[in-house]
Amino acid sequence: MEKKPFRAVRVSDRVYWVGAIDWAVRDFHGYVTGRGTSYNAYLILADKNILIDTVKAPFRDEMLARIASVIDPARIDSIISNHSEMDHSGCLPEMMRITKPQKVFASAMGVKALDAHFRIGPQIQAVRDGERVRVGNVNLAFCETRMLHWPDSMVTYLPDDRILISQDAFGMHLATSERFDDELPADLLREEAAKYYANILMPFASLIARLPEKLKANGVDPTIIAPDHGPIWRRGAETILTLYSAWAVRKASRKAVLAYDTMWGSTQLMARAIAEGLTAGGSSVKLLPLGSAHRSDVPTELLDAGALLVGSPTINGQVFPTVADVMCYLKGLKPTNLIGAAFGSYGWSGASVTQLTEMLRAMNVEIVSEGISVNYVPGPEDLARCVSLGSSVAGKLNALYS
Ligand code: FEO
């Protein structure tokens, strides 16, 4: 193999990071990754060498070079696949060809998913939830984390090292040359971890809420949490566990998010007037004009919000495409505890407000107003109604969250 300049990074006495950094990726199945990402794989060097997860297929050579900086890849004895999504399993068939491992471990659902992806067949051994396995002198504890992020997901705990290899959970999309949380600014870590949680894990909040208890019941008590994306939590393992517990209960606040798009500026005028009413009423307001904001900014801002107001012009009897896109995306992410309303301008048919109101209802948002439709350009009376809607929503948020 051509010698490449990539090195493994030591995580503990016998655990190494051997992943890849993707500085270029800006779209991760619909989520904008403005700072890129990393695909983390881990190598345990012991009397039996174990690789945990692999990387996205185009990054195979980078991972192999990092492994080769500490060991001949052919000396890997076992592979663990914590999660079958292609960003972690993309190189698994190739690694199996190279290493001819004695064992490949995955959850029962993981075995099925990997077979459906790669037709690997029965070479992979399913491990049970809570099962403990000793490979050489390495003790491994497996714990299923179904739906975090896929049905196959599991985590691997090294009790002797107190390292939790947590696959997608506790990760973030962030490409950096630093590998550990204590080498990066805390506000950057929080921002990207929150965005990741909101866009990837929010629908599974009830499972996240039960996760600490489940991990504890399985004897998982980590000092290091090593996810499959972004930095390794070496100093802040407790911090990220605490943040996840808080996000899981989605503690809302007096913050309102206004997500809207506009054709000729009228719906934008309405959004600004509503925002004035909200601000005057004591709410914190975040305007997200969808011509420039990305869909993934909306759930991120909703993580601590109490209200969602959505604005759209009517175009050919429908909601504007950027707004429809966001509503579809949000419905899948299932944000809870929201009040809301719709607004928008129209030319000859005001269908968008009715349609948006129905979409909000379908998301279990509590509708606090029938919404405001304005013909063409809002005049002073229309804008006064918008300010009044903002004040009314602020009043409700005050009553809920004071
Ligand atoms: Fe990072 Fe669900 O894959």
Image (spheres, rainbow, N blue to C red):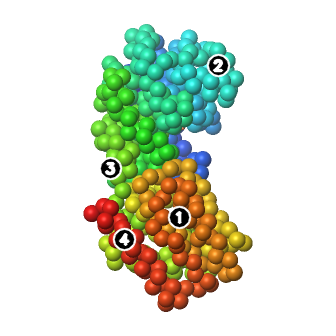
Q: Can you see residue 47?
A: no
Badge 3: how crowded within 10 Å, few (<14), some, or many (20+)? few
Please give the name of the residue rendered at 51% of the width and 27% of the height, measured from the top-left corner: 82
Badge 1: how crowded within 10 Å, few (<14), some, or many (20+)? some
Question: Sequence-wise, which precedes: disc 4 or disc 3?
Answer: 3
Relative image position of residue 214 (x, y in whole percent): 37, 28
Give the label on residue 394, or none.
4
Marks 3/1: CA distance? Answer: 24 Å
Return the residue at label 3.
186
Return the residue at label 1.
293
The answer to whether the residues at label 2 and label 3 have Cβ atoms under 8 Å apart is no
Is label 4 in a helix, a strand or a loop?
helix
The answer to whether the residues at label 4 and label 3 have Cβ atoms under 8 Å apart is no
Question: Sequence-wise, which precedes: disc 1 or disc 2?
Answer: 2
Note whether ligand 1 is within 8 Å of mark 4: no
Is label 2 in a helix, a strand or a loop?
helix
Q: What residue type is disc 2 on?
A: Arg
Give the label on residue 97, or none.
2
Please give the name of the residue rendered at 36% of the width and 28% of the height, measured from the top-left corner: 215
Is label 3 in a helix, a strand or a loop?
helix
Residue at the outermost bottom position: 380
Relative image position of residue 116 (x, y in whole percent): 67, 27
Please give the name of the residue rendered at 68% of the width and 68% of the height, measured from the top-left corner: 318
Q: What residue type is disc 3 on?
A: Ala
In this rendering, which labeled residue sits more in front, label 4 or label 3? 4
Please give the name of the residue rendered at 64% of the width and 19% of the height, measured from the top-left corner: 97
Question: Sequence-wise, which precedes: disc 3 or disc 1?
Answer: 3
Relative image position of residue 126 (x, y in whole percent): 55, 17
Q: Nearer the viewer, residue 307 or 136?
A: 307
In this rendering, which labeled residue sits more in front, label 2 or label 4? 4
Q: Can you see residue 384?
A: yes
The image quadrant that residue 244 belongs to is top left
